[in-house]
Every structure is written in C-alpha cells, then in structure tokens.
Image: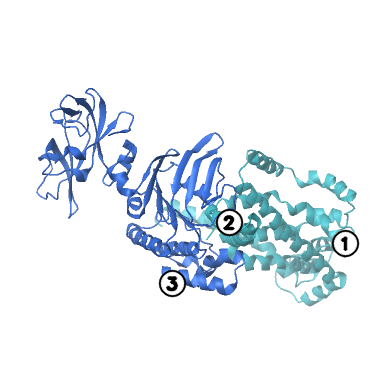
Chain colours: A blue, B cyan
Amino acid sequence: MSGLKLRNVKKSFGAVHVIKGVDLDIEDKQFVVFVGPSGCGKSTLLRMIAGLEQISSGDLFIGDKRMNDVDPAQRGIAMVFQSYALYPHMTVRENMGFALKFAGRPKDEIARRVDEAARILELGKLLDRRPGQLSGGQRQRVAIGRAIVRHPDVFLFDEPLSNLDAELRVHMRIEIARLHKELNTTIIYVTHDQVEAMTLADKIVVLRDGIIEQAGSPLELYDDPDNLFVAGFIGSPKMNLLDGTVEAGGIRLADFPNDLIPSPIAIPAGTAVTVGIRPEHFDPTGTAALDTSVEIIEHLGGETYAYARGTGSNLLTIATDNNRTLKTGDRYQARFNPASLLIFAKDGQRLR
Amino acid sequence: MSNPLALLGRIATYLLLIVAAFVSVFPFFWMMIGATNLSADIIRGKVTPGGALLQNISVFFNSVDMPRILFNSFLIAGLGTALTLLVSSLAGYGFEMFRSKVREKIFGGLLLMLSIPFAALMIPLFIMMANFKMINTYQAIILPTVASIFIIFYFRQATKAFPSELRDAARIDGLKEWQIFLYVYMPVMRSTYAAATIIVFMANWNNYLWPLIVLQTNEMKTLTLVVAGLTSAYTPDFGVVMVGAIFATLPTLIIFFLLQRRFVEGMLGAVK
C-alpha cells in the first residue's frame, strides 16, 4: 500500500506562507495531478512530498509511515524534473543506474533493471550516449527511466513536458499514460496545463495561493466546479463568465440587458451572480438564447468557434456546432439549455 | 574601405595590436635568444641566436641543485593548487548553495579583505608562522594561500550556473551533501576547475615575496627564488639567467596548453 496522506501541511519561507494548510488523500496506484497557475505552490508541495523542502508544519504519510523527517532517498519516491536534471558527465546507462549503485546493489541487478527500463522506454540504442547527445524527448525518457529503475512506490513528475515542443508533448503525454498502466504505481504529476491534467489524471487537485480549491476526478471538476476559479481554470476553451442580477423571472446579464434567461436554480431576486456557460454547451436546439453579434470566427475544421458580444465589451466564446457559413458581423442567436448554466455567488462560490 | 576615416581607424587598431603583441611577445623572444648567447652579447643587445646554449645550460646545472629545486617548486605549487582548489571550491559551493541570513554579509566581508595588499599581511603572517614553528617549511608557503578569496569568489560565480535540480536529483538518488559535491558537482564543473588550476598554479609557481621571506635554507628554495638569486651576483651571467627563466616558465606553459580549451570554457562559465 503506497497511498499518501497530507494532513494540514504548511510551508513558509520566513514570513512568506507558500502552502497554507493542505489536506489530501491519494490512493494507491492513483494518478494525481496538481494543477494551478504559476506561484500557486504546486511545485513546492511536490518538493515537500519528495523531501527536498522541509515541511513547516503538518504531517505527511506515505503508506502508513510518517515521512516528514525521512531522507528523500528513503521515502520510496522517484522524481522527474522539468529540466530533466540528468548528470551530464555520465552515460544514459550510468545515469539510470546511479541511484542503485549508491544503494549498494549488485552489478548484475543494476544491469538487469536498467535494461528493463530501457526496454519499457525504448532507450536500448541510446544507453552509451551522454545526455548532451540526446534530443529533448530522449532526455525526458531517460529521466523517466532513471525514476523507473528505482522501482519507487510513488512517482513524482514536476512539469515534465514543459520543455518539449507541442507535438512531442502530446506524444509523451500518451507515453506517460501508458507507463502508468504498465507500472501500476502511484503518480503525482505537477503541471500548469489543464489539458495534461484532464487527459492524464484519475484525480485533479486544483491549487491556488497555497490552498486546494477543489480536488476530484477530471469530469467532476469539469461538470461540477465548486467555485469560479476552478470553473475558469478547467476546460478549453475557457468557460464564459458573465455578471448578472437575479430578477423575478430569471437572470438578467449585464452584457445582454434585453434577454432574461431562466435560472436553473432558485435564487432570491436581487442577488448579484456570475453565470458560467462553457463554449461547448451552446446548442442550436437549446430553449434559451442570447442575441449576439459575431466579431471573430475560428474554423478548426471539426468545430467552428465564434467570438461574439452582446452590448458589453466581453467576448463570448461559442461552439457553433460547426456552423461554417457564419461570418464576422452576423447576428447570432447563441442558444443553450438553462440546465447547463453554472451560477456563482459574488464571493466566487458555486450556488447549487 | 572607401571611407578614409574607417581606414585610419583600422590602421590605428593594427598599430595598437602590433605594439601590444610586441610588448607581450618580445620578452619571451628575448629570453629564448638570450639563453643561446653569452652574457656580454646580451648586454650588447644582440638579438640573433648565438652558440652558447649548451655552455649556459651546463653552467646553470652546475650552480643549481636542479632536482631538489624542482621538487620543492612542484611540491609547493602542486600541493598548494590541489588544496586551494579543494578548499576554495567547497567554500564557493557552500556560499551559493546554502541559504543563510548572514551569508551575503560574510561574503562581502571576504571580498573587502581582497583589498588588503600582501605587504600589509607579511609581517603578522611571519610572526604567526614563527609562533607555529613553521618558518622554512613547505606548510608555511602552502597554508596561507589555501583559502583564496578570489578563487572562492570565482567558484561562487561559476556555481550560479550549476543547475540546482542536479543537486535535487542527487539527493533523491541517495547522495549525501559531500557525495553530491564529489560525484556530481566536481565532474560537472571540471571546466571551472581547469581554469582555476591554471590561475592558482601560476600564482603558486611564480610566488616570490613570501617564499623569499619564509624559506631560508638553500635546500628549501623554489625555482623562482633560485633564478632571481642568479641575478644578485656582482656580475650576473645573463645567459644562465635566461636558461633558468626558461625552466621556470615551462611548467606554466605546459599546464596552460594542456588545459587551454577547458580554460576558455571555464572562463565563459560553461556548464554542459
């Protein structure tokens, strides 16, 4: 059993509080992604789990053992860094076997485990090269290989794909997903890219300013965000967020004063709210509509996005069900089903 | 090249370079030529090779206990360089890697001490060595230079380019701090070590004033002292002095050419 438990974990650098109390349960063999904007503390939290940063207060358990003061090498973890952090003066083989050599493992066991990792990652031909002779993607695979040979209970990935180009990133993302299936271990993965988070995770932890905004499965976070921040962060293109006020027959949006839209939930009249609707939840067969004028059209082939506005300055992003005839300047009735609206109070919390 | 001003500028540049090249190369040339001439010819200003090279060499070896002198010089310069690099790079690594409130203050204080000339330290240092009963010993030459502020500064600057993720990776791989230094930092920073080797070895090899004061018997003297001693006779034999100068220059030249590529990398601060 190699689940993790974090109990009221805090971290401060002098007077600066970076992690402000995190409670989190990670189950064995789960793929957990920490996601959030830069500076939210996600990398710091990962480094605290790795033992590279001291935990200021709170408890960290890996399995059933409290790990706060345990040496990084004794925690049963392995880490893959954003910059790969391969030892430049060693060959790929030496890089991968380095930890085992230091742990005093016999030579034949090291060779066996390095070869096994090389097979999984298709690194066989590169074993005698040095990191300087490898491409970015190959280095990343070596860095993962170095983690694999240690047979860790928990893999930690710190923005491993950030330095790769877009195409390679998609490829490596699939590799990592495959790896998780094959190795069947707990993975904690840090990224600021919500697409990576959505595609890889069993569980996403959204962080902001050192606290957890919400944790749950990708679809839970997508369908049922707890607050404005998570709603805006998860999903691509981003959710449209419009200010409005509740009236007797529905909600009147500031940007669409002529349309009174039905509210999916009962809210007292006069309440100021923010209404969220995802671009892909606009539906030509919907029962409610916003009258917009189209400013920009994006044809992606499979889908056509319209960027349109009401009377205000905010642009709505609308998936038009691939309406290829739409042009800039057209009036467009953006139809939707009121049930797909998400309503948030002024403090950003979701109203259900 | 049609612009006369540009042409003039170019001519001035080349003139300046020629003068600079002359100033730096001529002494070397003069040393080589001088070694082949008799003292009288050298004084007369003869600048063509002569036939007295073998004679000068034999006089030099007859007047100097060369094996002993070379042993002294190499021991002091070699051991001194190794210890200086070890201690100063450890200090530079420590200054850069470990956060502390007083770190910058201590470092600033160290840099301030760079401004104290050696002449001001000489007498207190001598008294200290006398109290430690280390006058006329190798330690007296080596120990005062082992913690070189300049080299500490140099290593600290170079360490800024050392990726801290390498240290993190090594910690996760189970290395203790000293093992990280030994197995990761030192190999990764080898260009910096090469550049520092040249600087420190040359400084140690050419060191004159302090050995002159501390080394008092002939069998302890270094090559620099001995060559300088050759000029102190009433009628110095300059041909022999030039032969000595060549022997005194050779090791630094050899080390420089061996480490030249790394020296340039190190000066550029390359971490690869």
State which quadrant residue A28 falls in. Answer: bottom left
Mark 2 is surrounded, within 10 Å at the Cα level, by few (under 14), some (14 to 19) or many (20 or more) other residues, namely few
Subunit that carries the residue with mark 1: B
Distance, label 1 to label 2, CA atoms, is 70 Å
Distance, label 3 to label 2, CA atoms, is 26 Å
Q: Identify the amino acid type marked 2.
A: Gln
> Is label 2 in a helix, a strand or a loop?
helix
Q: Identify the amino acid type marked 1.
A: Ala
Mark 3 is surrounded, within 10 Å at the Cα level, by few (under 14), some (14 to 19) or many (20 or more) other residues, namely few
Q: Residue at x 53, y 73 (%)?
A: A111
- Give the numbered dot on residue A119: 3
Q: Residue at x 47, y 62 (%)?
A: A143
Residue sitting nearer the eye, A51 or A40? A51
> Is residue B39 visible to us here?
no
* Side (left or right) of A318 relative to A207: left
| Image quarter hosting the N terminus of chain B | bottom left
Same chain, labels 3 and 2:
yes
State which quadrant residue B237 falls in. Answer: bottom right
The residue identified by callout 2 is: A74
